[in-house]
Image (cartoon, grey):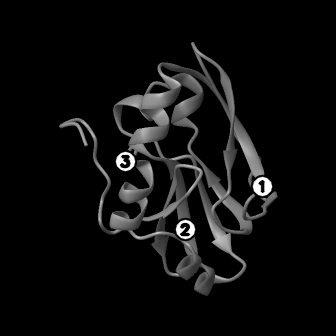
Amino acid sequence: MTSDERYPDELRYHPEHDWVRIDGDDAVFGITWHAQDALGEIVYVDLPEIGSSVEAGSSYGELESVKAVSDVIAPLSGEVVAVNEALTDNPALLNEEPYEGGWLIRVRLDDPGAVDTLLVRDAYVSSLA
């Protein structure tokens, strides 16, 4: 791991390089440091509308970087209750602050217990090796 990489202990991780922060029956989704580093400079974000549903393992949006366009995969299922509008004007927040200002969506979870299917920090970091 380089000195720039960060993977907070309190988050859960999906093998497709997404993170989840649980907040009661809601969860905030974002992409990991590894994902933003692999993408390079992110220049455009396409996210779902509030009220739409996301399904675990399925794409719910796209991130466009100077290198490629990549799908964002939902780590859990639920209804979108908030979208990070700041990314519309400043998609670089995903590169600068992938765990804070660069969050993507907030979801009301269909099954909060499904978080147990996701990786803890050490298991995720081991998967990167």
Q: Which of marks 3 and 2 is nearer the N terminus?
A: 2
- Tell me where residue 61 sits by quadrant: top right
Q: Distance between the residues labelled 2 and 1?
A: 16 Å
Q: Which residue is drawn at 36% across and 56% down?
A: 125
Which mark is in front, 1 or 3?
Answer: 1
76 with respect to 22 (left or right): right
Q: What residue type is labelled 2?
A: Ala
Task: Kindly report which numbered mark, 2 or 1, lies closer to the viewer in this rendering.
Answer: 1
The residue under label 2 is 27
What number is the disc on residue 77? none
Q: Earlier in the sequence, mark 2 or mark 1?
A: 2
Q: Which of marks 1 and 3 is nearer the N terminus?
A: 1
- CA gap between label 1 and label 3 equals 23 Å
Residue extending furthest toward the top: 66
Q: Which amino acid does the dot numbered 3 rest on?
A: Glu
Report helix, strand or loop for mark 3: loop
**For this view, does 76 lie left or right of residue 37?**
right
Which numbered dot is residue 100? 3
Query: Of residues 7 and 127, which is closer to you in this image?
Result: 127
Residue at coordinates 42% horizontally, 40% vertically from top-left?
34
